[in-house]
Amino acid sequence: MLDRVLQQIDDDLPASLDRLFTLLRIESISTDPAYRDKVAAAADWLAEELTGLGFDASVRPTTGHPMVVAHDATATAGPHLLFYGHYDVQPVDPLSEWATPPFDPRIETVDGAKRIVARGASDDKGQLMTFLEACRAWKAVTGKLPAKVSILFEGEEESGSPSLVPFLRANVDELRADVALVCDTGMWSRERGAITIMLRGLVGEEVTISAADRDLHSGMFGGAARNPLHVLSDILARLHDADGRVTVPNFYDGVAEVPDDVKAIWDTLGFDADAFLDTVGLTTPAGEAGRTVLEQIWSRPTCEVNGIIGGYTGEGFKTVIPAKASAKVSFRLVGDQDPEKVRENFRAFVTGLLPPDCRVSFASHGGSGATRLPFDGPFLAGARAALTDEWGIEPALVGGGGSIPVVGDFKRELGMDSLMVGFGLDDDRIHSPNEKYELSSFHGGIRSWARILGQLGG
Amino acid sequence: MLDRVLQQIDDDLPASLDRLFTLLRIESISTDPAYRDKVAAAADWLAEELTGLGFDASVRPTTGHPMVVAHDATATAGPHLLFYGHYDVQPVDPLSEWATPPFDPRIETVDGAKRIVARGASDDKGQLMTFLEACRAWKAVTGKLPAKVSILFEGEEESGSPSLVPFLRANVDELRADVALVCDTGMWSRERGAITIMLRGLVGEEVTISAADRDLHSGMFGGAARNPLHVLSDILARLHDADGRVTVPNFYDGVAEVPDDVKAIWDTLGFDADAFLDTVGLTTPAGEAGRTVLEQIWSRPTCEVNGIIGGYTGEGFKTVIPAKASAKVSFRLVGDQDPEKVRENFRAFVTGLLPPDCRVSFASHGGSGATRLPFDGPFLAGARAALTDEWGIEPALVGGGGSIPVVGDFKRELGMDSLMVGFGLDDDRIHSPNEKYELSSFHGGIRSWARILGQLGG
């Protein structure tokens, strides 16, 4: 049965491409109000496509751009899956750097490989269409899907998803499924699939330290008056020990080691830490001692100072002792680290280091825990098998250094884990001129989803 | 003879005040080009006054506002003295906060004390006129001055003195004297004179630390990439040890202890360190352990961070690892500390602390050594005796935390020390609305200069 579905996909590829091109021609830039109607047109087109496939599809208004929600209940067994993608795209500036118009998709061939060039080809229209086309093939061959499938297409992902959480909260029962399938990540390489199994969480803090009730002249007060820039530097310098570990008390509570079988996969990835650092002009890992770079960026928590400002920072020089100085500090979280505990411990740590005459104030800039797909559950197992069959090699099970907000939102609002499978490549130039999506990503992506549906349907 | 001079000063006080008022009415704001003619008018008026006193006086053009230079060679003995003051004034904004027009001088009485209210009353027209009136009295009584006197009145002090050094360099032989008398400082209190015997020098440095060749996303690189904000904080935190001493190697070379007799005078000053700190909302001296606050601000060298900037510092949050971060750092110097050695040692210190992948660049923001009047010379001795006689109490011998540029310029360009005696008070509101000069400062200032001229003339 699966073989017939895959054959159908191969046979239908030209038509699949035509449909993708139709979607790519719709200028659905969500950040620019001038394109509001185009964004709506993309939603309408998707809802019509889904309706044509037998989904119960609707365009659902929000205070911003609409959601597209669709359900298919033709399956007689299997879990309930919620597929997520976004149909809005980034602006196209600078337009002059595009070799061809961004909304006039074309196929180009580079080194014998065909690629689809257009804004949104990779992020995320090409990706979401891989799933839609996989459903189409299953329906064409079997008349139904192997599992109960719901779909959520968002039109505001490139604008910070302001309507997403309210929409999830208002539609919990309709949208909650056994697992979410999120298609907005990449492959490990052109030839090897990837499943993102963990994303670090994030706590943002802004700390402001003040001393005197005004800026002071260092000629008059220098040597006697407390300088908040010194105090801030001292405190920031104490956030890490000599081994690069974070010194905030109890910071590592809830941090677990990655299972051995995952580490074993990481060892097979051929990840070149030197090359990774070299792309940005660095040579030497600067983080926690005794950890590989992959651990440092995927599975270990961090504390980074993201900004400092205080005193005179313009041209020339002023000999001021400022009244205050501030820093933005973020923590990347893993495992079960509790964002609010981390925040609380950080604030206590800073407060405990204050010398006389200093006051501190804190501002919170959000907090979310890490997300992690259960290592031993059926969804990861099914996707691993499917991607291994399709690409002929075990998929990379990777961590993500940063968060993907929708994944945290699904977990928090719907209590639902996410299986992150995508087919983008690092050189897809998403958000930049001449964005592209490999034809092998599109074609292999459709086939991969067809296999995953088969595996998860059992 | 001196008694007759002092009597002449007392008798002539109303006329002296009339002359000061005439000068105060001239709107000689040097920073505003619209007042260029007024500045010139003040110079002309001063040159005429000096000519009337028998000085060989001239208005000397510069590329900015003119200098007034005058010489009197009626003395038959004594040293050659160069008196310095400035006839330009600060702008008057905000005008609405002046109780009466800033260039319409008046006498007001507060708590029984008369004060002269006008822009420039204290800074520096009232001060420079104390010397001119002292010369007038000596001339009136004796027909000559007790010492050879030259005068330099500047019209750009409030604009950063751009023409001063070029003018000194072009007129070294004409202006070089045995000592400069600089009248731009204050009394210790209404009842006690002061001589500023030491001013700290200043070295300004800007240090920029860079690592990756671009700003990085902390989700992607955080934990592995070098963060210049961490490196900068670490280095700044190491500039002082736990006792508040500067850790830059050899920093204290050339730092001498203040002589015991000067320290003994400091002990008599009744300086209230708590009150000093309380004026700016502080309670606890933050500097070098084991030093009094007066030592900390007058006679000890310091290192202060005056500004830091790096990363994202706007509203909200960005999880960036910036490519670079920078700080402005200044050193206050005392004794014989060599500014260029301090700079060199600081740069070596920072460079030595750089971890892998970091580069540093430095920018120099000026450097000047400390200035100090020889503790055991005749000029300090004469001024001490004169001020003791006039005010009935030994003058405070004070340090200045910051530099007074002209004093450094005189030392550097003319090899000449400066005797800094002035009669301003801390509450004179210089640079602010309702600037005032106590009548007791003006009258006592004239009498003080008359006595100093007598003492130095021998």
Image (cartoon, coloured by chain):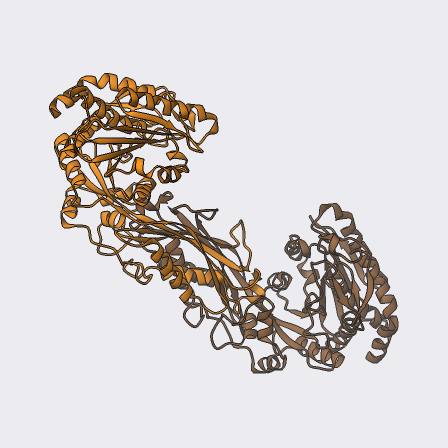
Chain colours: A orange, B brown
Q: Give the left or right position of residue A60, taking residue A221 as reference.
A: left
Instruction: Compare residues B348 and A227 and report the one nearer the observer.
Output: A227
Instruction: Compare residues B203 and A425 and report the one nearer the observer.
Output: A425
Q: Position of residue B116 (x, y in %)?
A: 79, 65
Q: Give the left or right position of residue B410, taking residue A379 as reference.
A: right
Instruction: Compare residues A12 and A213 and report the one nearer the observer.
Output: A12
Q: Give the left or right position of residue A458, taking residue A438 as reference.
A: left
Numbered disc total: 0
Is residue B305 shown above or below B138? above
User: What residue is rendered at 40% in x and 60% in y?
Assistant: A347
Q: Position of residue B178 (x, y in %)?
A: 67, 69
Quadrant in the rendering for residue B377: bottom right
Is residue A166 shown above or below A201? above
Q: Position of residue B87 (x, y in %)?
A: 74, 58
User: What residue is rendered at 63% in x and 56% in y?
Assistant: B165
The reply to whether residue A76 is visible in this rendering is yes
Q: Position of residue A130 (x, y in %)?
A: 25, 27
The reply to whether residue A281 is visible in this rendering is no
Instruction: Compare residues A37 and B443 and report the one nearer the observer.
Output: A37
Location of the N terminus of chain B (image quadrant): bottom right
User: What residue is rendered at 57% in x and 63% in y?
Assistant: A213
Location of the C terminus of chain B (image quadrant): bottom right
